[in-house]
C-alpha cells in the first residue's frame, strides 16, 4: 500500500501511514489483554517468534518505584513483554536509528558510519508491511508505525509485534519526555499529514489520537520530530518553499524558533539528534548534520541513496 506523503514537498511513490501516540503508563491497559513473545532475526528479517504480549504485574525492584520481573533492563510499566527477557530488546546508545519503509539502520553520531540492522519482520501478519516512522522511549524500546498498525520492534532482530490498530495516517513519530505533555509519563506523539500534533492512548488494541495543536506554524504537512530531556523538541516543518528545522513547544506542537532552513532538501522525513546536533534524513538519500547552537549545516552526506522514511533517538541520553 502506497501513497504520496505531503511533507516538505510531495514524495513520489512514498508509503502511506497511520501513526499514533502511546502514553507509556497506558500500555498496561493493552498488556492486560495479551500473552507472551520471543523473537530471533537477521539482516534478512528472518526468525521465529511467539507473537502475543504478556500480562503485567509487580516484580523485582528496579529503582524506587519500578519493577522488572524478567530482568531485561526495561521496567514492567514500559515493557510490552514483561515476562520475556528476550523482548522487547534495548536500543544501542551513541547511535541514531533510522528507517526506510522496509529496513532498519543505524548511524554512529561520532563517525557518521551507517550500518544496516536488517529487514523488518511483521507479527502476527504474514505479509510485508511498510514502516513509515520509528520512535524510541527513554528505556531504548523501539516502536514503529505502518499505514494501519503501531508496533514494537526488537532493535537487534528487527522483528515487529503489533501493539494497536491506528485510525489515520500520520507521518511523524516521537516520544516526548515525561513532564512535558503528561506529568507522570513520557508520551508518544504523532504528526499527521495536515500538520496536527497528536498523542495516542492505547486501549484494547486500539489507538485513540487526540490533537493537542498544530505542528510548527500550521504550514501543511510536516515531517519527523524528536525530543530529548533537557535539550528540546525539534521537527522538520513544511515552510511552503522547502523544509526547515524548528524547535517546538511539546505541549501543543507550536513553533518556538526556527533552527535551520533546508531549502535544498524538500523531503526530510527522518529527524533525530544528540546533544547540540540534529541529523536530517532526506527521502532522496542525503543526510544533513545541523549544529543546533550555531543554527547551521555542518556536514552533508550526499552520497547516500536510501529513501529515508524516519529516524529515532532516546528521550533520555547519558554521557553526552
Image (spheres, rainbow, N blue to C red):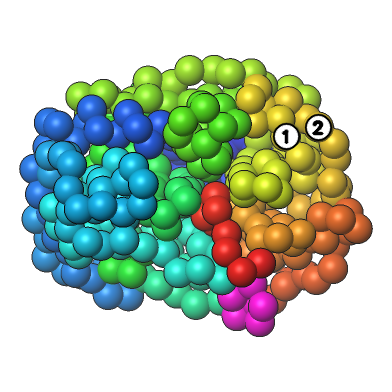
Quadrant of res 250: top right
- Could you tell me which secondary element the residue under label 2 belongs to? strand
Quadrant of res 302: bottom right
The residue segment tinted magenta is 108-113
Give the quarter of the figure containing the N terminus: top left
Quadrant of res 248: top right
Determine contact: label 1, label 2, CB under 8 Å: yes
Please say if 294 is above or below 35: below
Q: Is residue 263 left or right of residue 110?
A: right
**Residue pictured at 78% horizontal, 30% vertical:** 255
Q: Which residue is mark 2?
A: 256
Q: Nearer the viewer, residue 79 or 128?
A: 79
Give the quarter of the figure containing the C terminus: bottom right
Q: Nearer the viewer, residue 123 or 21?
A: 21
In the rendered image, the residue lying farthest to the front is 64
**Residue pictured at 84% horizontal, 68% vertical:** 298
Q: Nearer the viewer, residue 239 or 235?
A: 235
- Across and down, in percent, residue 279 comes to 69, 60
**Residue pictured at 33% horizontal, 69% vertical:** 156
Please say if 194 is above or below 118: above
Amino acid at each position: 500500500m502506497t501513497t504520496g506523503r505531503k511533507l516538505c514537498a510531495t514524495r513520489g511513490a512514498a508509503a502511506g501511514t497511520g501513526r499514533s501516540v502511546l502514553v507509556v503508563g497506558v500500555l498496561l491497559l493493552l498488556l492486560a489483554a495479551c500473552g507472551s513473545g520471543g523473537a530471533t532475526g537477521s539482516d534478512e528479517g528472518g526468525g521465529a517468534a511467539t507473537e502475543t504480549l504478556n500480562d503485567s504485574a509487580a516484580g523485582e525492584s528496579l529503582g524506587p518505584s519500578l519493577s522488572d520481573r524478567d530482568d531485561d533492563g526495561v521496567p514492567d510499566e514500559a515493557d510490552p513483554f514483561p515476562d520475556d527477557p528476550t523482548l522487547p530488546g534495548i536500543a544501542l546508545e551513541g547511535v541514531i536509528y533510522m528507517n526506510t519503509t522496509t529496513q532498519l539502520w543505524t548511524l554512529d553520531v561520532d563517525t557518521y558510519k551507517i550500518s544496516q540492522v536488517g529487514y523488518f519482520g511483521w507479527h502476527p501478519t504474514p505479509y510485508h508491511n511498510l514502516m513509515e516512522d520509528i520512535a524510541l522511549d527513554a528505556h531504548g524500546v523501539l516502536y514503529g508505525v505502518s499505514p494501519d498498525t503501531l508496533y514494537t520492534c526488537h532493535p537487534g532482530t528487527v522483528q515487529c509485534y503489533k501493539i494497536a490498530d491506528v485510525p489515520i495516517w500520520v507521518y511523524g513519530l516521537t516520544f516526548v519526555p515525561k513532564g512535558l505533555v503528561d506529568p507522570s509519563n513520557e508520551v508518544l506523539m504523532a504528526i499527521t499529514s495536515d500538520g496536527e500534533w497528536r498523542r495516542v492512548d492505547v486501549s484494547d488494541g486500539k489507538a485513540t489520537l487526540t490533537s493537542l495543536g498544530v505542528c510548527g506554524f500550521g504550514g501543511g504537512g510536516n515531517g519527523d520530530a524528536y525530543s530529548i530531556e533537557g535539550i528540546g523538541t525539534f521537527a522538520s516543518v513544511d515552510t511552503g518553499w522547502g523544509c526547515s528545522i524548528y524547535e517546538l513547544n511539546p505541549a501543543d506542537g507550536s513553533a518556538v524558533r526556527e533552527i535551520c532552513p533546508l531549502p535544498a532538501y524538500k523531503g526530510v522525513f527522518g529527524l533525530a539528534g544528540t546533544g547540540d546536533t540534529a541529523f536530517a534524513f532526506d527521502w532522496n538519500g542525503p543526510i544533513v548534520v545541523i549544529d543546533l547552537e550555531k543554527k547551521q549545516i555542518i556536514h552533508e552526506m550526499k552520497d547516500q541513496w536510501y529513501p529515508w522514511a524516519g529516524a529515532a533517538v532516546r528521550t533520555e541520553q547519558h554521557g553526552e
